Amino acid sequence: MLQPEEKNVPKILLEFLIYGTDEDKPLVTKALDELQKQQSNSRAATKRMRILWYMDKGEKTPDEKKAWFEENRKCKYFKFIEPPYEIPKNFVKDCLQKIRLCENAVNSLKGAGIELSKATKLPPLLGETYAEIIEE
């Protein structure tokens, strides 16, 4: 839920977070470039996804970086990009398609009168992905 001061924050479906240390910079840069290229080649991704990155000299652990992201995200779904920072061909398109399939399945369940329990944890859809359904 957006706070009153965040009314101008765009609604994002999917955010990617790439994190690492200065030593990882060449690999992170390559992954960022590939994600941005795939995003710009997809009209759907242009408006529905955002890429965030978090680099430091090793002051924060990977878990602290993930916690920072979770606290600062403004999205419905998110994915961490971790070492070895490899981005497969059509990765962005595949992620958005999997989200669409998941949401269609959830809507189909609701249409049949079947509701998800708040305690239900959905299986990972995008590899090691954490997803949360936000009621609108």
Image (spheres, rainbow, N blue to C red):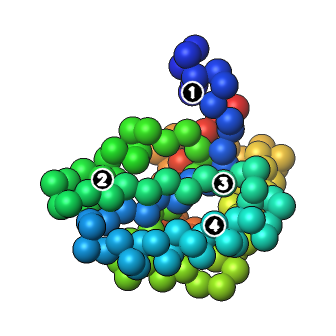
Image marks 2 and 4: residues in contact by CB distance under 8 Å: no
Q: Is residue 107 visible?
A: yes
Name the quadrant of the C terminus.
top right
Which mark is first along the chain, 3 or 4?
Answer: 4
Read off the residue under disc 3: 49
Task: Judge left or right: residue 35 versus residue 52.
Answer: right
Label 2: few (<14), some or many (≥20) within 10 Å? many
**Residue mark closest to the camera, 4 vs 3:** 4
Callout 1, which amino acid?
A: Met
At x 72%, y 51%, the residue is 48
> Residue under circle 2?
65
Compared with 13, 5 (above or below) is above
Query: Mark 3, mark 1: which one is toward the viewer?
Result: 3
The quarter of the picture where the N terminus appears is: top right
Amino acid type at image mark 4: Gln
Mark 1 or 2: the one toward you? 2
